[in-house]
Amino acid sequence: GAGVSQSPSNKVTEKGKDVELRCDPISGHTALYWYRQSLGQGLEFLIYFQGNSAPDKSGLPSDRFSAERTGGSVSTLTIQRTQQEDSAVYLCASSSQGSHNEKLFFGSGTQLSVL
Amino acid sequence: KQEVTQIPAALSVPEGENLVLNCSFTDSAIYNLQWFRQDPGKGLTSLLLIQSSQREQTSGRLNASLDKSSGRSTLYIAASQPGDSATYLCAVRQMDSSYKLIFGSGTRLLVRP
């Protein structure tokens, strides 16, 4: 596609429910990143996928968070048993090959609100 | 641990002014530094990327400089316009974890007509 696409753009859920956030990277991009942006905070790294390599999950804040990337393209970030502190904007980004010299291209994000 | 700081947190200027946004980082072992723009409810748009071996990059009315040894970068916006109103974020890519960008908290810019 022309850019990184994320869905839904907004999600309101009740505490304790599970949510799934989707990211469709730029076609052909092998590297995919998830970041979280809480109100008034900088962006926090969550997870990184590069090709067929094992993902770097070091940024996931708890075991309630997990992510998959099927077929090297679309990625899903799942949050189980959501808590109010999970409320944030979840941003996905992709880059061509995951080289450290590349620009990252971000999607518009999913605004998650946990009531 | 790398820390990225942006000053000021917010800035309001009249249209037409030239302005400078500041970014500092504590660990100079970086591959590059990137400036992004974020509009309300939107994702991030990459503005300029400066490699560690470069001193500056220019794009239109934007000029970004990098002084790696002192851990500083500036984003200069010439002849500001109301359409420049947005949050500006800087991010560094560290040499010890090359795929992670470490972000500052941003500078919220308002350009008044």
Image: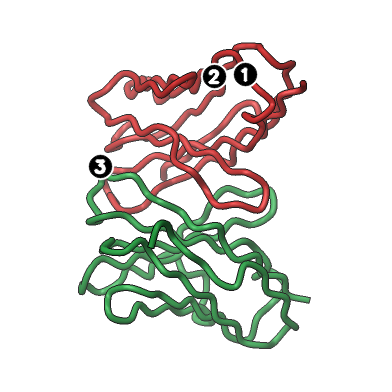
With respect to residue A37, does A72 lie above or below? Answer: below
Residue ID for mark 2 = B77
Residue ID for mark 3 = A101
- Secondary structure type for disc 1: loop
Q: Residues within 10 Å of mark 3 (few under 14, many from 20)?
A: some
On the image, the x and y values in percent for residue B63 come to 44, 19
Taking B38 as reference, is B53 left or right?
left
Taking B6 as reference, is B90 left or right?
left
Task: From the image, state the color of chain B.
Answer: red
Give the image quarter of residue B33.
Answer: top left
* Mark 1: amino acid: Ser
* Mark 2: amino acid: Ile
Q: CA distance from mark 2 to mark 3?
A: 24 Å
Q: Which mark is residue B80?
A: 1
Q: CA distance from mark 1 to mark 3?
A: 29 Å
* Mark 3: amino acid: Asn
Which lettered chain is shown in green?
A
User: Which of the chains bears the disc numbered 1?
Assistant: B
How many numbered marks appear? Answer: 3
Let me know if marks 1 and 3 both belong to one chain: no
